[in-house]
Image: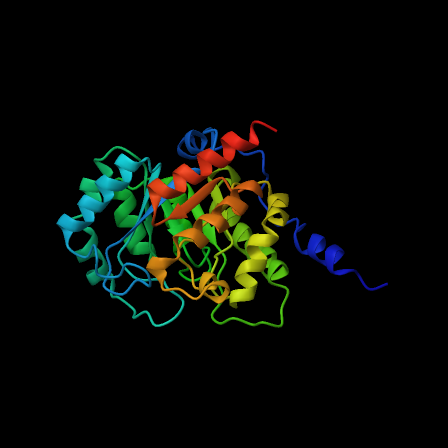
Amino acid sequence: MPGTAQSDRMTAASSTSRPPANDACHPVLQALLSRPSPAIMGVLNITPDSFSDGGQFITPDRALAQASRMVAEGADIIDIGAESTRPYGSLPVSRDEELDRLKPVLAPTIALGIPVSIDSMKSSVVGWALETGAAIANDVWGLQRDPDMAGVVAEHGVPVIIMHNRDKADGGIDIMQDIAAFFDRSLAIAAKAGIPAGHIVLDPGIGFGKTQEQSMTALARLDELRTFGLPILVGASRKRFISTVVPSEPEERLGGSIAAHLIAARAGASIIRTHDVAETMQALRVAQAIEAKR
């Protein structure tokens, strides 16, 4: 008998390839997840071509000033990237160029005193950053693009953010089934490499390998990913899907970003990745305070 769409989704989200969810939570994640509201990850792009703020923080002094500002505004994590991972129009960056951008900025950012995640698709860059003191690896290809990434993460014993991605969007698929199947593959890779489940965060990859409708669907059906038993990160900040609802440029999408993040938090997201730390933190805390009066 053919399954319903709902039963198909549940089947896609129930693979036995997942690592056991009772693995001890990494201390860095435990500290972040113990907060009463979702942890805030501030975005620091030291790139010339990121979709929202490319070039604004390319110089070390501007990057460090932005990192300090986000810490002062209440960021719990700084996510630093030196190669644009936007899904359209970004140019590949060599390992050496990526490291040249990171070297003046990473250690001083770590010295600000909160966990720093390294947003890179290259295992060699991630390895260098972790050796320098970064606390989290953030892989927009979910351990599936660079064959050495899982080993580097396992070797350093750090948390890893596994993000769903696709080479190109396909509007004809059930995006939640695709995300669940992708995560099952990533979790199998992680388990084989020796990465404990308690070190893993899942990110549905809003805006990556998805149509704008699929990005909104991923947010609307985010609670389906809770069946994995792992923390969920959502980064909808300034993403293009917002402009399909209200035409706007990236810097004009604060309202839409906050709306998406409030919905994500209510659906169970534990970490919110944002360009706008103060505004996002205020929205989350006020929403939480209101919900507490129910």
Relative depth, front residue between 141 and 23: 141
Relative depth, front residue between 155 and 254: 254
The N terminus lies in which quarter of the figure? bottom right
Relative depth, front residue between 30 and 238: 238
Where is residue 81, by image quadrant? Answer: bottom left
Does any portion of residue 235 appear in the rendered image?
Answer: no
- Percent position of residue 175, x then y: 60, 62
- Percent position of residue 206, x then y: 48, 58
Identity of the residue drawn at 49% across and 33% down: 25
The C terminus lies in which quarter of the figure? top right
- Percent position of residue 235, x then y: 44, 51
Where is residue 97, by image quadrant? Answer: bottom left
Identity of the residue drawn at 29% across and 42% down: 134
Give the residue furthest to the right.
1
**What colour scheme has been applied to the protein in the rendered image?**
rainbow
- The answer to whether 202 appears left or right of 117 in the picture is right
Identity of the residue drawn at 64% across and 64% down: 174
- Percent position of residue 38, x then y: 46, 37
- The answer to whether 156 appears left or right of 192 in the picture is left
- The answer to whether 176 appears left or right of 31 in the picture is right
Does any portion of residue 74 appear in the rendered image?
Answer: yes
Task: Tell me: residue 83, above or below residue 130.
Answer: below
- Total of numbered circles in the picture? 0
- The answer to whether 121 appears left or right of 1 in the picture is left
